[in-house]
Image: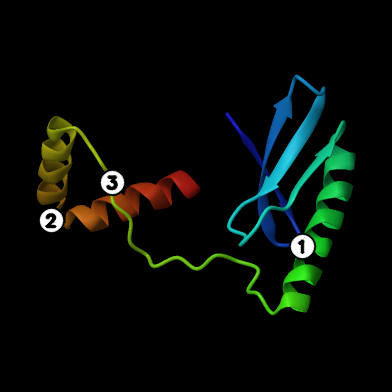
Amino acid sequence: MNNVMEIGGHRAVIQFDPEIGMFRGEFLGLNGGADFYADSVEGLRREGETSLRVFLEMCEEKGIAPTKRYSGKFQVRLSPDVHARAAEIAAARGVSLNRLVQDALELVER
């Protein structure tokens, strides 16, 4: 399981890279790469702050929005059995399939 660290209001996924013996952080939802490496949590936070600051400065210099924009739509591929079961659950709850998925994702976020 990946760990998430919040730095400067932005979330980053943290993983350990055994090949280099360091932790790697990668910011989520940015319009470009802003990753960082360190061998400790304190180092990760420090390097993450630096990486994010440099990334945001470059975006400002180039007039680029730093974060991705999402449409609010995505397609999910399921097996026919899972699709049928999800439709049954949604109907039993009196909600749309979209609402069922949204509710499930909101529960995961908590």
Cα distance, mark 1 to mark 2? Answer: 45 Å
The answer to whether mark 2 and mark 3 are in CB contact below 8 A is: no
Q: Provide the secondary structure element on which disc 1 rests.
A: helix
The quarter holding residue 78 reads top left
Amino acid marked by disc 3: Val
Mark before the other along the chain sequence, 1 or 2: 1
The residue that disc 2 covers is 94
Check the image and name the residue furthest to the top: 18
Q: Position of residue 69 (x, y in %)?
A: 50, 68
For marks 2 and 3, give the one nearer the viewer.
3
For marks 3 and 1, give the one nearer the viewer.
1
Kindly identify the residue that appears in the image at 82 percent across and 63 percent down: 53
Amino acid marked by disc 1: Phe
Mark before the other along the chain sequence, 3 or 1: 1
The residue that disc 1 covers is 55
- Mark 1 Cα shell of 10 Å, populated few (<14), some (14-19), many (≥20): some
> Looking at the image, which is closer to me, 60 or 28?
60
> Looking at the image, which is closer to me, 93 or 13?
13
> Looking at the image, which is closer to me, 108 or 23?
23
Q: Provide the secondary structure element on which disc 3 rests.
A: loop
Kindly identify the residue that appears in the image at 13 percent across and 56 percent down: 94
Q: Position of residue 33 (x, y in %)?
A: 68, 53
Cα distance, mark 2 to mark 3? Answer: 21 Å
The residue that disc 3 covers is 76
The quarter holding residue 99 reads bottom left
Q: Position of residue 66 (x, y in %)?
A: 65, 68
Residue 108 vs residue 102: left or right? right
Residue 108 vs residue 88: left or right? right
Q: Is residue 25 above or below residue 79?
A: below
